[in-house]
Amino acid sequence: MKKIDIHVHTRKVHGVPSLAGNVFPTYDELRLMYDKLGIEKGVNLPLGMSGPEGSSQIITNDESYELASLYPETYYWFCGVDPRIGGNTPKTDLSYYINYYKELGARGVGEITANINMDDPRVLNLFHHCEKCKMPVTIHVGNPGFGSYGLIDETGLRRLEYILQQFPKLIILGHSQRFWAEISEDCTTESRNGYPPGKVAPGGRVIELMRRYPNLHGDLSAGSGHNAVTRDPEFGYAFLEEFQDRLYFGTDFTDPRQIDHPFAGLSGWMDQAYEGGNISRTVYEKVCRKNALQLLERDMTI
């Protein structure tokens, strides 16, 4: 069964390398990576359009749209909308921008990387318009201050809970170290910035929020999502079972060399979990493919 990747970043050309030497994969490079991992299609997420923080170069909405138009067998796409666009005010009609890209085929908004408080009035305005336009949102949970990107929330994810309460019809895909480290009750200010090893302590905040708010979904991409389900395999199997309708396989590829990165192993880990009888075929198919298709192919008319 071919998988759907809920989270990838790719460009028509490499562009300027990052300071670490990374370059975004082109279509040809990504297609080779996908074929190796058994992935049919991915959701290309613009970078820098929902906040320039953390981006060495910009993946524009127009470029994401063009790639999806040229290679519809490989790409879905989300659009990027910065909550500060259109005047840097919480009164901006962001539906104007969202609907423009929605009519071009965008299936959601994100990844939102603006480094401002998650409950900032401008962010609340963005979420209001995403909900109004029936567009799911992928968020990157970040820290405040220099060297960070993503919507700011502290340990305990209290701001995220407020968002979930205020916008019950808005599907929010949680992502990043600061999100997935909170799968374990013993998450600390230090551990949430990395990939905590070992057993998952019962009572994690992510578990609590997912049980309480059906609009919170989980993006399993990158090292953070991979670590959340693989650090404690028995927990991971149970987690996939309990939330099988709201979890999505993903990669978060940002460089062709990441085909050899440990987080690229999530595809094989899911295969082995199913083949070894640790998760059911139903769970395997939902997380790897069917949930994404349901999200991306749904009726989005207002």
Image (spheres, rainbow, N blue to C red):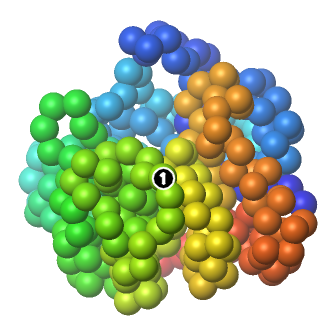
Instruction: Find disc 1 in the rendering and name its residue.
Output: 197
Asked if 291 appears above or below 4 in the picture, the reply is below
217 vs 296, nearest the viewer: 217
Q: Callout 1 environment at 10 Å: few (<14), some (14 to 19), or many (20+)?
A: few
The reply to whether residue 278 is visible in this rendering is: yes
Identify which residue is drawn at 71% across, 31% down: 259
Type of the residue with mark 1: Pro
The reply to whether residue 96 is visible in this rendering is: no
State the quadrant of the N terminus: bottom right
Identify which residue is drawn at 42% across, 52% down: 196
Image location of residue 66, percent across then percent down: 62, 34
Image location of residue 231, percent across then percent down: 56, 57
Asked if 151 appears above or below 256 in the picture, the reply is below
Image location of residue 116, percent across then percent down: 16, 49
Identify which residue is drawn at 74% across, 24% down: 29
Identify which residue is drawn at 32% across, 53% down: 192
Q: Is residue 98 left or right of residue 83?
A: right
- Which structural element holds mark 1? loop
Toward the bottom, the furthest residue is 212
Question: Which corner quadrant of the image does residue 215 belong to?
Answer: bottom left
Asked if 264 appears above or below 103 in the picture, the reply is above
Q: Is residue 154 left or right of residue 257?
A: left
